[in-house]
Amino acid sequence: MKGNKKINLQEKELYKLFNEIKFEESELNNMGEEVDIIQKEKIKKNLNNKIKRKNRSNKLKYTSIAAAITLVFSIGIVTASPTFAKNISVLNSIMQTLNNKYGNKGDYAKYSEIINKSVSNNGITITINEVIADDSKLVISYTLKSSKKIKDLELFGLGGFLRINGKNFSSMGTSLGQYIDDYTYIGSEEIHTSIPKDKKFNVDVNITEVSDIKGKWDFAFSALKEEIFRESTVFKPNQKLDLPDSNVAIDKVVFSPIDTSIFITGYSKNKNIKAGPNGGMFDYNYWIAFDDTGVELIPKGLGGGKFDFNKNTFSSEMQYEKSKSIPKYLTIIPCKITPSGGGGVKRDENGKEMPITIQTKKPKEIGKIIDGVYPIELSQGKMGKLIINDIKTENNKTIIKYTAKGMAPYFQAQDLLIKDDKGKCIEIKDYIRRADDQNPNEFTKIFEALDPNKKYTIFTNNFDNVEFREDLKFKIELNK
């Protein structure tokens, strides 16, 4: 593979892959009533947010239960350009390079510990490059080299092979990855799991399989939380919320060198709730946040957490990109998102397959033909609108500059796509970018180059599947 060639899966292939994913129902039963939110948070939110938008990147979100389950929602393979490969050696931080590429602005290189341990087996060498730890997660970067061409490494993850202080824990996370060439893959994985309170703890990663190749790649190292904890600012608001389906307590808000997080615990009002794909314990789990100047925080991972169906309790973390400064307060608008599609298969303890069905609601598509006359205005229903200011094709890519106006500009700006006259969506080459801090509602999005001899439609949707509950809006005062 050369240059920036992308090999992507279409929506029907994603659904096919999703339906081929199986897990043992007994694994859920063995978790002592505490179950990661795989059915609701990752099926509902990620299928809605990723498949609906057809944002094909090799940014993978997954959930692991008892180190046995991996769910895939956003899949793609991107081969690095020579410039990108050069930048890795210059920066000397795979973690920083990949997070920069995908728009995460944290100071990963500054706060990571260098591990650089390698293990070779069956023609594959895996190197653990760096690690960062805080109170809720591990971030691990790695390099994988093979003597033969190896495919589907965007599906590979470390979470299922992880032990902390000798114990296995359920986990969820996000994996970023990049093919450098046919034989080399780099990754950075953020794993949310049970982190010890100690400043230093032991990590074992015992990998037994890489892309259907069996083997043994065992790593042991320690992780330190002290430096990143020292540079973090923690607020404990002790704030209580009464949401339609739950009572929620805001336990702490953390501004760290790599991200901003709101940690909550809660109790469901529904006494009869059971584990299942359609939720009901904590449905208003997508929190759109604004700082004290009214600028929307960029979400990094919202709604992940755990349910205890025996006690009707849950915990969750709302994660956003690193803040440049600490505001006086945050304004939060809780949302409930119903996915536009999805489903899956599970297998019970007897091996019988049963379908997983989820409640869906498809929003209305709103689009206009690209005719070279600007601005192009696209309504987004009650949420607001997008204004396309310019579309330019150069250097084998099409660059769109646009403005989002409405209730949640960044949230709205993510939903912008292009399709050809046959209805095929044009591949996205880069995530949306804010113009600058002075113009937070101005955005740029980059697609594969449009053919000047073809007609295209640029479109968004009316967000009919989103309950944007401005009536539930509240402030989190950030006082020490």
Image: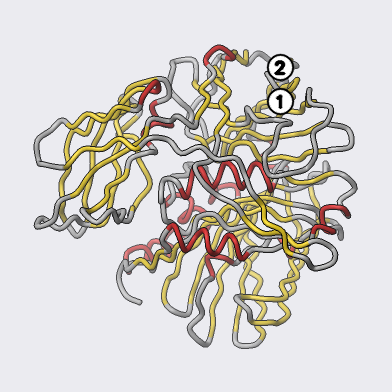
| Residue contact between numbered discs 2 and 1, judged by CB atoms under 8 Å | yes
Going 70% across and 43% down the picture, which residue do you hit?
134
The disc label shown at residue 237, or none: 2
Whole-Å distance between the Cαs marked 2 and 1? 6 Å
Going 86% across and 51% down the picture, which residue do you hit?
31
- Is residue 350 shown above or below 268? below
Answer with the quarter of the image where residue 276 lies.
Answer: top right
Q: Amino acid at mark 1?
A: Lys
What percent of the width, then of the height, locates residue 272?
83, 31
| Residue density around tag 2, few if under 14, some if 14–19, many if 20 or more, within 10 Å | some
Q: Secondary structure at mark 1?
A: strand
- Is residue 260 shown above or below 84? above
Residue under circle 1? Answer: 252
- Is residue 135 shown above or below 240? below
What percent of the width, then of the height, locates residue 25?
80, 57
Image quadrant occupied by the C terminus: top right
